[in-house]
Amino acid sequence: MKLQHIPTPNQIRSAPPERDEPTKDWCPALRSGLLPPGLRDFYQSTKFLSASRLAGFDTASKRVVTVYINRLFGSLKECIVEAQEQAEEHQTYLEGMYDPIKGKQDEAAEELARRKTRAAFRLFMIDIFGMFDVVAEMIAVFLPGELDRLRVGRSMFTKHVYEWASQSLPAPGIIISPARPHVERLHEYIRREVVDDLIGGPWFNLLRVYRNKVTHLGHQTWQAYGLHAADDKIYYFLPRSWPSIFERDIQIGPSDRQLAKTWREHMAEALMHVDISTFVEETNKRAVTFVDGCVQILYGAYRALGVRRVDEIAGALNEQTMANFTTFDPAG
């Protein structure tokens, strides 16, 4: 089907999003219990993201900002829900992977399970970082101009927010922004949770590496190692170095020669110390909790200051053609 074959509509209707109850796409997520309290409170206190509680709807700039805020909240909601779905799917397929202890084998089913397990992990990582990047966009909207290099529509958490939090917050100038207390609170929170924390800092850095590798290079470039535990189950562990090539440490020669490392020493050095199921489960919990902490700070900024600099935000969201592509047909 080509665009020119679509008949012209008789009418197009649009109305300001004023609501007295959650929209249909939010109801299942609210019922699921997956949405954290800060996100729920923000959604409900704005009358379910009604225009009158956001930027308004009576000018083009206000309409653009109001609709964009609605989309950001919807994206964060879906990332949270989908991350949980991918975590569950990952565990389901993980249990169907090759296990020599089972005895009976179904090679086709095991190969499918292996591929689906890795696909679910890849999508899980995309959803986790989707949460982070949506939060970066929310910061740009609710604290406009407060973070250097952070621009609405172009926000990246790792590049613009994490790096900002990794550095000391510059001292305020002669004129102090009314948003300064919220900026300080946000900086202190992000730095504490994913920069300085003895677990959170290394966790976030490893998470960032995995997100980049599994999304850009695909399934076969990273490996999980299945190890047989005392309970007769196979547990899979992810490496914490890149690239992890187990064959690099094979020693060729007599079997009685002195080893540089024991097997356990090598595993302790090369792998995470929790299995992949635990890593996915805890990553999901930690990411949602961290994101909600950011949302709660932004909620405080919103309650104190509202949605500010609407024309400036709308200008940053000025629609631009991404490419000249329209069709695969040279004739048009």
Image: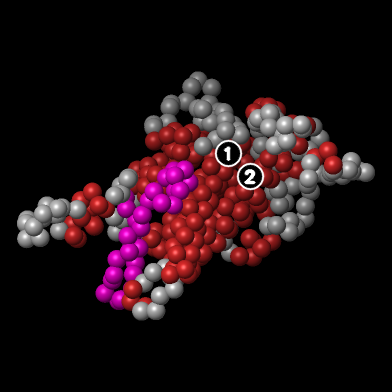
Look at the image and tell me whether residue 304 can be seen. Answer: no
Q: Is residue 301 left or right of residue 71?
A: left
What residue would you read off at disc 1? Answer: 137
Which quarter of the rendered picture does the N terminus lie within?
top right
Give the secondary structure at mark 1: helix
What is the CA distance from the residue labelled 2 to the residue labelled 1?
8 Å
Which circle's residue, 2 or 1, is located before the other in the chain? 2
Q: Decide: marks 2, 1 in contact (CB < 8 A)?
A: yes
Residue 238 inside the magenta-drawn segment = yes
Which kind of residue does numbered mark 1 sit on? Glu
Q: Position of residue 66 (x, y in %)?
A: 72, 40
What residue span does the magenta drawing correspond to? 212-240
Residue at 77 percent across and 55 percent down: it is 20
Q: Which mark is residue 119?
A: none
Toward the viewer: 49 or 276?
276
What residue would you read off at disc 2? Answer: 72
The answer to which quarter of the image holds residue 97 is bottom left
Query: Quick check: 127 above or below 324?
Result: below
Number of labelled discs? Answer: 2
